[in-house]
Image (cartoon, rainbow, N blue to C red):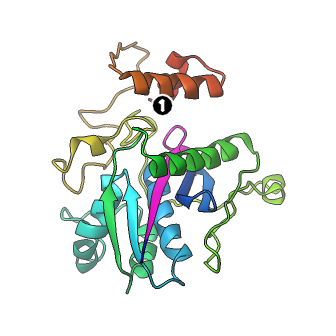
Amino acid sequence: MTITAAADGSALGNPGPAGWAWYVDDSCWSAGGWKHATNNQGELKAVLELFRATAHLDDDLLILCDSQYVINSVTKWMRGWKAKGWRKGDGKPVMNLDLLKEIDEAIAGRRYRFEWVKGHVGHPLNEAADVRARGAAEAFQRGRPAPAGPGFRGGQAAAEPAVPSRAAASAGHSASAPTTERVTERAGVYAHDELFSLDDLGDDFGEDHRDLTDPHGPDATRSDGELHRVTLSLSAEEHRRVLQRATAGGVTVEEYLRGLI
């Protein structure tokens, strides 16, 4: 028997309030998040928690994922990274190391395969996971409770709650978030946003295509007060989705897109 599940992550601001979710059906899903993390960390965490939740089952696992970074990390690059002491070909440390090591441990002895699906095109399982991951991110953004989901019966619970802890908040603490991914807010250059992804360009970027730009490098966008015009073409479905999310957030489409950038 094969379990088919979608796994997805979301980050509002990337980095910012972030969420993760895996989804099989309305009676079998789980979600969680952090006050501050990246989209890549959410994507990895969703896959990790799916493996953990199904560890008690002796079934094959088909993971639908819209992140080629995650798929390639697990299926192509991780073995080489391990052989090099968890370093990349250029000798630099692997990003998101803690999550990758946990995934490496979780997949030992498991029968699984990944299938890439294009995000935000109406795939029912991917959309369901996306809604729940984004819902968790929005809950952490607003300090509101978010459903953690029923999980798998008899499976392992999520690693951290999907609701912000009132006790932790009053004490000045938040849910633990990964800290291994290098993030450059000053540069204003991010590897992934909620609508459009370098994943859509395929594998030509290689294993380092998601490393963020050095804030002092030639490609950095400096905060010099200059305004830049960006032209973006959207399909009718993409425009509908942007409008829907902007309306839900109480902002204009322009404000919503500027927030993603």
Quadrant in the rendering for residue 177 = bottom right
- State whether residue 86 appears in this view: yes
x then y, percent, for residue 11: 52, 44
- State whether residue 38 appears in this view: no
Indicate whether residue 11 is drawn in magenta. yes
Q: In this view, does 24 lie to the left or right of 71?
A: right
Predominant SS along the magenta part: strand
Q: In this view, does 122 lie above or below 241?
A: below
Q: Is residue 150 above or below residue 21?
A: below
- Farthest left residue in view: 204
* Residue appearing at x 61%, y 78% in the figure: 155
- Of residue 255 and residue 240, the one placed in the foreground of this image is 240
- For disc 1, the marked residue is 260
* Residue appearing at x 31%, y 32% in the figure: 220
x then y, percent, for residue 214: 32, 42
Indicate whether residue 163 is drawn in magenta. no
Quadrant in the rendering for residue 135 = top right
Q: What element carries label 1?
A: helix
x then y, percent, for residue 70: 35, 59
Report the quarter where the C terminus lies: top left
Q: In this view, does 214 lie above or below 108?
A: above
- Farthest front residue in view: 1
Span shown in magenta: 3-16
* Residue appearing at x 56%, y 26% in the figure: 244
